[in-house]
Image (cartoon, rainbow, N blue to C red):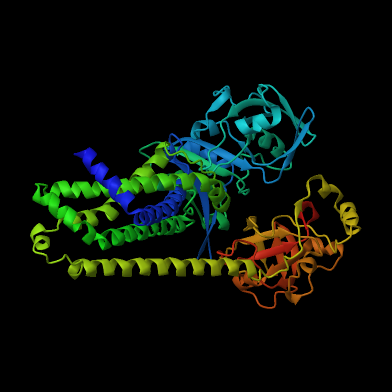
């Protein structure tokens, strides 16, 4: 019987080639677009879940409750890890990560390569996270202080097919590092993406202490470390966060820490949520998932409409089958089988299209998806999509075709597709067009938003401005600037202590004339050269900016938002203390965007400290 059903199904498809092509091609296009979006959604939702103990790993963040606003820092002081392991029994393990924000020159024999994507980590990094060593000693990943662990790709880049263990890489022409281990490349769905891991002991050594400055484990004021905790299964993250807050306040009692508290963020939420649980991408994932479902639904409605529109051509066939003994259950199975056959052929075409489109799709989405239909996570998406599509597209046509009554046709009263069936199909057409219009409007809105972002006035002139890292040039900035200005087409050169497009540095170490005793204040900080405002065409609304004299080291320029939140009027000429250095507000700059456009403009201070130079523009 099954063989007979398949034979009839293939004959029917072959007899109606145009109809079959439209059905199969329409479903294929819908499945291709829907599955690609679902694969993106599945990848986003899978971030960091590959770690063995992901459910018990948390990232520590500090929330500063300043003037009714919660400013969250993703980095924390180094000592909190030491005290947590000693004084908080719920903590099973912990590690600190200090990312290197600039590239370094790595040299091995005749190879000299610039290396980024590196970080200093505690040895416990390999116990907290599931990045097992494929070469090296798991119990002692760093053999000596000046050692490093590479990913397989990094090891291949420097050593080719040589065994990397024990090899020496010279970094920045200063120190020799011994390769002590190799790990597999960190997955694309990992929030941690490093190629080189260096021991935290190097930071401890360079930090100093017991002299002019504190040791790394004594400095509670430097929020410069990503901190992760592995908790016992019965531990409550909120309880641990409260204990860590009290520990910090006890060791650094002041007005600033009195309004600070810690938050524990589950590792699997790190990619799509902020530390306080608000949206950081999950809304986009939900929208994309909904769009994928809508696209597949439109394709299914198209199939149902085409199948039911041709119902009269199958009516006599169904009636004859019923006359010779076929019951409704058998007919339902036959037509569901035909739908499954069409869907199967559509899915095969869709898989071919997906395989061809994945490289382009990765370029557009910034993903590293490798399309292997037999991979469990991808296979689950395909199977679920096929089952849902079969139910949506196959059930109604099968029910309709198996419900025909032979006597109506034998009496020569031709079957009409009108009535409730016609009304239902009209309803499907309306839904299909409505969903299509919604998608089109949504696409136009998104396109408009992208155009807005591209054309938005950021508050400064970004055209024909390029930037690069200074590295050793920082020590000879004036000479380098003079040489650059000799080049044709170079109109001016300036430098900053950070990326003006995405400034991440901020502080609460401020005081000013007229400050209320209980007022706390977080301000973004950016070291600039004296000509920075002129080169970037930033507009002063008060004051004259830097004077070009040595006094500029105590001259500060604040933006409008900073002045507003400080609650002062006529700010120019008033005293302002910044990082324990007394100075004067000499100018107020018009607000400009220095972070993602989705974030509102925050307080900003521009200051002239040459030892804070970074990128050059």
Q: Position of residue 430 (x, y in %)?
A: 32, 70
Where on the picture, by quarter, is residue 199? top right
Residue at the spot 74% in from the left edge and 65% down from the top edge: 463
Quadrant where the N terminus sits is top left
Q: Is residue 306 left or right of residue 530?
A: left
Residue 285 spot, x, y in % from top left = 44, 55
Q: Is residue 358 left or right of residue 232?
A: right
Q: Nearer the viewer, residue 93 or 331?
A: 331
**Residue 296 seen anywhere in this rendered image of the structure:** yes
Q: Quadrant of residue 308?
A: bottom left
Above or below: residue 59 compared with residue 184:
below
Placement of the C terminus among the 4 image quadrants:
bottom right
From the viewer's perspective, is residue 381 above or below residue 505?
above
From the viewer's perspective, tell me whether residue 426 is left or right of residue 212: left
Write the residue at 31% across / 60% down. Answer: 306
**Residue 36 percent coordinates (x, y):** 46, 50
Q: Where does residue 235 sit, x and y in percent of width and height?
A: 38, 40
| Camera-nearest residue between 297 and 367 | 297
**Residue 142 visible, this angle:** no
State the count of labels: 0
Residue situated in front as seen by the camera: 13 or 112 = 13
Residue 507, placed above or below residue 50: below
Observer-nearest of 219 and 420: 420
């Amino acid at each position: 019987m099954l063989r007979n059903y398949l034979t009839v199904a293939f004959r029917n498809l072959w007899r109606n080639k145009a109809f079959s092509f439209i059905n199969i091609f329409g479903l294929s296009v819908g499945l291709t677009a829907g599955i690609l979006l679902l694969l993106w959604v599945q990848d986003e939702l899978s971030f960091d879940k590959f770690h063995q103990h992901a459910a018990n790993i948390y990232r520590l963040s500090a929330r500063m409750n300043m003037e009714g606003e919660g400013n969250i820092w993703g980095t924390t002081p180094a000592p909190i890890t030491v005290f947590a392991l000693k004084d908080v029994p719920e903590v099973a393990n912990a590690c600190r990560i200090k990312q290197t924000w600039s590239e370094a020159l790595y040299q091995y024999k005749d190879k000299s390569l610039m290396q980024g994507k590196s970080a200093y980590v505690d040895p416990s990094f390999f116990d907290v996270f599931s990045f097992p060593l494929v070469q090296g000693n798991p119990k002692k990943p760093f053999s000596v202080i000046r050692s490093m662990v590479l990913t397989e790709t990094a090891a291949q880049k420097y050593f080719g097919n040589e065994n990397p263990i024990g090899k020496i890489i010279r970094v920045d022409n200063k120190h020799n590092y011994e390769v002590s281990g190799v790990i597999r490349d960190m997955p694309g769905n990992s929030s941690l993406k490093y190629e080189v891991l260096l021991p935290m002991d190097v930071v401890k050594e360079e930090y100093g202490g017991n002299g002019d400055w504190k040791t790394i484990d004594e400095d509670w004021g430097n929020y410069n470390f990503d901190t992760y905790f592995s908790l016992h299964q019965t531990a409550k993250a909120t309880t641990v966060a409260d204990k860590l807050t009290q520990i910090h306040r006890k060791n650094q009692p002041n007005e600033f820490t009195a309004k600070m508290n810690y938050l524990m963020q589950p590792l699997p939420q790190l990619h799509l949520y902020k530390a306080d649980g608000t949206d950081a991408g999950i809304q986009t994932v939900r929208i994309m998932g909904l769009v994928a479902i809508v696209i597949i639904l439109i394709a299914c409605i198209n199939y149902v409409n085409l199948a039911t529109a041709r119902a009269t051509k199958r009516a006599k066939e169904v009636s004859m089958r019923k006359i010779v003994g076929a019951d409704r259950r058998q007919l339902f199975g036959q037509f569901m089988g035909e739908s499954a056959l069409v869907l199967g052929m559509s899915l095969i075409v869709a898989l071919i299209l997906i395989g061809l489109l994945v490289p382009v799709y990765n370029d557009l989405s910034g993903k590293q998806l490798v399309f292997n239909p037999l991979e469990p996570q991808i296979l689950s998406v395909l199977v679920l999509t096929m089952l849902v599509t079969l139910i949506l597209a196959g059930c109604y046509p099968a029910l309709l075709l198996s419900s025909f009554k032979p006597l109506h046709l034998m009496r020569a009263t031709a079957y009409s597709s009108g009535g409730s069936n016609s009304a239902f199909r009209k309803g499907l057409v309306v839904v299909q067009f409505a969903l299509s219009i919604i998608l089109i409007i949504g696409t136009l809105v998104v396109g408009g938003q992208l155009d807005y972002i591209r054309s938005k006035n950021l508050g400064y002139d970004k055209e024909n401005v390029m930037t690069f890292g200074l590295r050793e040039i920082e020590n000879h900035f004036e000479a380098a600037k003079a040489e650059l200005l000799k080049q044709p087409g170079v109109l001016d050169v300036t430098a900053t202590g950070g990326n003006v497009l995405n400034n991440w540095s901020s502080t609460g170490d401020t005081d000013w004339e007229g400050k209320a005793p209980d007022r706390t204040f977080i301000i973004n900080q950016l070291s600039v050269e004296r000509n920075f405002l002129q080169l970037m065409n930033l507009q002063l609304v008060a004051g004259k900016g830097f004077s070009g004299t040595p006094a500029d080291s105590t001259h500060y320029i604040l933006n409008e938002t900073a002045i507003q939140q400080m609650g002062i009027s006529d700010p120019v000429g008033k005293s302002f203390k910044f990082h324990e250095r007394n100075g004067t507000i000499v100018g107020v700059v018009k607000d400009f965007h220095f972070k993602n456009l989705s974030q509102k403009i925050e307080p900003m201070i521009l200051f002239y400290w040459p030892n804070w130079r970074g990128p050059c523009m």
